[in-house]
Image (spheres, grey):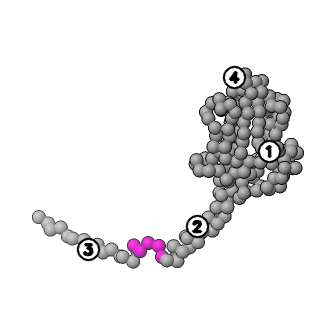
Amino acid sequence: MRALRSLNVSHNRDNDLGFTLIEMLGIVAIIGIIAAFALPSFFGWVTTKHVENVLIQTEEALKEAQSTAISKAQICTLTINSTTITATPPVCLPTGPRTLTQSDGSPSRVVVIAQSTPITLQFSPKGSTPSSNILVFSHPDQPQQMRCLAISIGSGILRTGRFTGNHPPVLGEINTTNCQTTL
């Protein structure tokens, strides 16, 4: 029987070292540059979503109260501040008072300012409102991303849009001219 020859395989350890320090620093620098460009846009997007989230929570509470006023044939009054929405009588918000929060459930830093204060809105048994109002939603970190919610007198139609006035908005400029709404 023939003897098997053993193969001497030597590993060249110099080829298995991985990245050099210079290559690693180059990769870290490239990631840092990309992050420097991306993070401000990302944080702006997150802040915009916080404002839109509070706007949606408020709009849903108003629609719920308006629907309840019609279905129960009673007057429903909502009181809104920067942290909560409450109803009088409480049955006007069947799912309970709202605590305005961010999408992750943490307290919102969004500020709600209205054309008239205190922010009290009333819906008749027909779903109409005795007065109009405009609510402006702004975040202290993102002045260019203000949103608005306009409530029409009489019909109670709710429209949302962008607020184009100064940040923070002053009462004199909270009007239909600065609230660019869509139906």
Q: Nearer the viewer, residue 96 or 135?
A: 96
Question: Which of the numbered marks, if any, corresponds to residue 72?
Answer: 4
Amino acid marked by disc 2: Ile
Q: Earlier in the sequence, mark 4 or mark 3?
A: 3
Mark 1 touches mark 2? (CB < 8 Å) = no
Foreground pick, 78 / 147 = 78
Nearest-to-viewer mark from 1 and 2: 1
> Does the segment drawn in magenta span residue 70?
no
The magenta region covers 16-20
Tag 3, which secondary structure?
loop
Mark found first going from the N terminus, 2 or 3: 3
For image coordinates 64% across by 38% down, the residue present is 97
Tag 2 residue: 31
Spatial CA distance of label 4 from label 2 is: 59 Å
> Disc 3 designates what residue?
8
> Does any portion of residue 52 appear in the rendered image?
no
